[in-house]
Image (cartoon, helix red, strand yellow):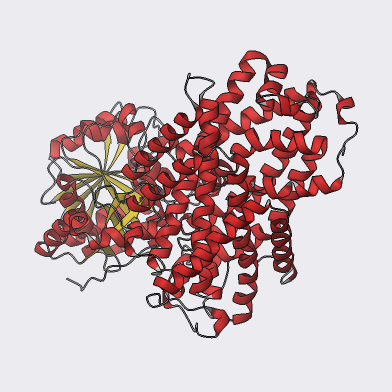
Amino acid sequence: MEEKKEQIHLIRELGLIEALAIGLGSMLSAGIFVLSANAAERVGPAASLSFIFAGFICLPTALVLSELATAIPKAGGSFTFISRAFGPLAGSIVGPGNWLGLTFFAAFNLHAFGHYLSYFIPINPLLGAIFAGIIFIFLNYRGTRITGLLQKYIVIFLLVILIIFIYLGFNKVDTNLYKPFIPYGWGVVIGIIGLIIVSFVSFEQISTIAEEIKNPGRNIPLAIVGSVVVVMILYGLILLVITGVLPYNMIGSIKDPIVEVASKSMGKLGKLFISVAALLATASSANAAIITSSRINYAMGRDKILPNWFNYIHPKHITLSHSIVITGSLAVLLSLTGKIEILAEVSSTLLLVSFAMLNLSLIIFRCANLNWYKPIFYAPFYPWLSLIGTALSLFVLTMMDNLSKIIGFSIILGGIILYYAYGRERTTVKGLIGKLFKEDKEFKRIKEVFTERMGISERNKILVPVKNPKTAKSLISLAGFIARGNEKLTVTALKIVKVSQNISISAAQKYILKKPNYRKILHMVENFAKKKDISIHTILQAAYGITSGILSMVREINPRIIILGWRGPITFHRIYENPTKDIIEKSNCDVAVLMDKGLNKIKKILVPISKGPHCKLSLRLAEDISKACDCKITAIYIKTPRDEEKKDEKLEKLNNWISQIFAEEVLRNISLSICNYNSVVKGILAEAKIEKYDLMIIGASEEWRLKKFLFGSIPDYVANKALCSVLMVKKHEVRHISWIRKIQIKILNFKIRI
């Protein structure tokens, strides 16, 4: 047994759509359903310009954030970037500021949620806000997955409703209502930005999950910048609809202008849909703000700016339970004030201070010439973009209401006091600006893992995900035989621990590695492997989903083959419910699935053959097992009445084909036979029954791509009916080769040889 060293793997499960959903889900918030009316009332038709200007003000910061997020993929987002650039004092200003800024934002959305809930239930809006806050605290404390896939569908629903609202709303627009377009002057158009910019600042939340996003060099900037651009366009068009349907000087007397416009343009059904959209948008934004702010607390606790109490992880639910309760409770209390504009402006004030420092942080990182600072995406027009972003953020701050500025800067002062009272003597973080920061080894390690490209490492691993102790032993035993027969291969057992999306993968990973109970099955596997003299490595990995976690690990360690288990019959219903099909389809390596029917010693292996890449893989695996077990391999070709080729000619061609796969000396271990049957399936099952084989290895058919099959109609049926254990295999093919093969087989009836 080799000495094992536990590694912390940085896996990425979120694609561009999921990352965009997180950004848009936070930005499509009460800003649309509350602040749009406020802006239209104060500015008139030109309110659409105010929202567009607000979006453009955020774009430089979005580009800067994209670079920093690809360079330092770590939980905490802008707090982490700023504290590493300016030092822990700046972190003590920005950290609590970001945390409370998002808490104020959550409160703003909770209050709006309560207001729209009263449309459907006769309830006081404040009670509705309390109800929503308690529900979100409970769900996130328990780790219920109300984000992820659900978040994506909520965002899609919102986009569809808002696009329909815009399209039908323009049909009702009276262009005369746009005259005058700027009734109160340009000063008001610019001045309102301080209030409405809160609708855009949530794009920063994407940076807190940068370590979990696939293809970060492309997806992170597209998600961050794309969120700002999409929301900017939507807000601009929505304001044009509102002020084109309702006179701007009467909007203040209407309870909910956007609902009134929906009623005029879409009827009662439109009013219902826009109200439901408001509920979903405010709920989604409030929940996302609570989750993100709890991650900021975790980052501050990690850097010892806050006590460890704040980054406590619940032992059962694996959630940031203390931070969630504190943040959620504070958001509920703030929502009860009913001061929506103050909540929005305080949130903006705190987050704009962070944006100004964030832009300057990029200049510090670039000037430091650090060996480990190598972003995958570089912000353009450096350093002018950063300077413009800083200036614009400070400019908007000057337009804030005085009370909002007093509250915001009081919170910043509290952060400074917190640093000198608690964090100064405890934190080990040092800032680049003070020339004290030489090189952060942890960041360097994260960067090395984060930028590792698929395919650099040699494909020498057999990956075996383990979950069920009843199947784990047979899977490890089979993997051990293959590895023993092929000295280049090693066995890696993987245990995925599913965690809630309200905790970062890095935080969850560190937690589960400290808890022995999560390693129980891995310890069992290690002991079993030791008895069988199998060299094995083990990986315990946190992930948001079993399938996404396995696929991310496949991309991370780049195995030669992944071996999975299957218990019970293969049916369409079970294929649909089981993650195995997704892994077969999406893995960038060979895949094998074992249906174990009492596999113990292997003396005889049956390999049904037909020319193709999957059959080649079957023969290669059989050869590896044969070397380890000294067993006999029987390759059979089932000849049906439709096959007009003579038996001797077919035998000669198959022998030549096999000789191209293996060296001549290996052929002594393989006996080839051709058997006549009316159907391929009946022939395989009959031959397997006659000789009582221990293991059958069968390659996928071309039908494996169909959702109703696991490996194809023949492999699936054979696996269900065979008396022996069956290993179904699929060879990984580059996508374009796979489709060429499919076209040739289906249309030209011709099989290519590769």
> In terms of depth relative to the viewer, which is nearer, 359 or 166?
359
Counting from the top left corner in percent of width and height, residue 734 is at 50, 52
The answer to whether 257 is drawn above or below residue 208 in the figure is: above
The residue shown at (51%, 44%) is: 106
Q: Is residue 428 left or right of residue 381?
A: left
Residue farthest top in this picture: 268
The residue shown at (54%, 46%) is: 105
Q: Is residue 177 left or right of residue 41?
A: right
* Quarter of the rendering containing residue 253: top right
The residue shown at (49%, 84%) is: 438
Q: Is residue 360 left or right of residue 706?
A: right
* Quarter of the rendering containing residue 278: top right
Q: Is residue 412 left or right of residue 187?
A: left
Where's the N terminus, which quadrant? bottom left
Counting from the top left corner in percent of width and height, residue 309 is at 32, 60
> In terms of depth relative to the viewer, which is nearer, 339 or 570?
339
Q: Is residue 655 visible?
A: no
The answer to whether 296 is drawn above or below residue 683 in the figure is: below
The residue shown at (50%, 54%) is: 100
> In terms of depth relative to the viewer, which is nearer, 584 or 205?
205
Counting from the top left corner in percent of width and height, residue 92 is at 49, 67
Counting from the top left corner in percent of width and height, residue 410 is at 55, 60
